[in-house]
Image (cartoon, rainbow, N blue to C red):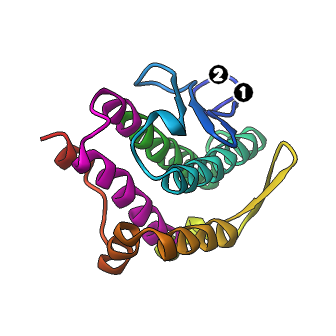
Amino acid sequence: MGIFGGPCKHLVDYQKESLSLSGFSGPDKVNVKFGDLKIDPKVMQTAAEITQLYDAMQYSDCMKIEQLPKNSPDRVKLTHEVLENEHQIVQLALLIKVLALSPNSEKLQQAIVDWIAAQANRMSHSPEMTPKVLRVATKTLTVTGVRSSIRATADTVPALKSALATHKTFNFKSYLE
């Protein structure tokens, strides 16, 4: 049983060149092939890897919640972590939807880069992001591994390197104005 009575479930289906996000409140299911967006595929692959990590974390935490008493402070903490990870996944899903509507928008392309930079910052400064090892299908994900992927992408994508240097937080609404 999930945090609001439904079953715990994965929200992300990642294939090498595509991403499907579903199962959450908010936007309709998002299916995207990286080649359909006018953004560096390395950027999208890095964003997809981050969402996979968040999805694995929210699923793992959701399963742990089921094992805790209803009045446990740890249950409240894990519920918050599940919701925060889902929030980040939904932000990316909405960015992808808006970018698909305006694929030439440099502002929206930058928004995805800035979202990645903000996630790198979150991974470095949030206690709930302590190094974890999570399995998704046949793949093992770690916070350290995802952070390494972000740095590798930044080495070839100047916009990401610049965004990482500013230690930004991400304000989704500002990209819609």
In the image shown, does 131 or 114 lie closer to the viewer? Answer: 114
State left or right for residue 59 relative to residue 176. Answer: right
* Residue at position x 50%, y 76% in the image: 155
Query: Considering only vertical position in the picture, is 57 above or below 123?
Result: above
- Decide if residue 69 is in sight here: no
- Decide if residue 38 is in sight here: yes
Q: Splitting the image into 4 quarters, where does residue 102 fall?
A: top left
Type of amino acid under label 2: Gly
* Residue at position x 38%, y 58% in the image: 113
Mark 2 near mark 1, Cβ–Cβ under 8 Å? yes
Q: How crowded is mark 2: few (under 14 residues within 10 Å), some or many (20 or more)?
A: few
Q: Splitting the image into 4 quarters, where does residue 118 fall?
A: bottom left
**Viewport quadrant of the N terminus:** top right
Instruction: Kindly identify which residue carries mark 1.
Output: 1
**Viewport quadrant of the C terminus:** top left
Q: Splitting the image into 4 quarters, where does residue 82 fall?
A: top right
In the image shown, does 6 or 50 lie closer to the viewer? Answer: 50
Residue 6 marker: 2
Q: How far apart are marks 2 and 1 (CA)?
A: 5 Å
Q: Position of residue 91 (x, y in %)?
A: 39, 42
Q: What secondary structure characterizes most of the magenta part?
A: helix
Q: Is 53 within the magenta? A: no
Q: Residues within 10 Å of mark 1 (few under 14, many from 20)?
A: few
Type of amino acid under label 1: Met
* Residue at position x 40%, y 75% in the image: 161
- The local secondary structure at tag 1 comes to loop
Magenta region, residue range: 95-123
Q: Is 104 within the magenta? A: yes
Q: Position of residue 66 (x, y in %)?
A: 74, 38
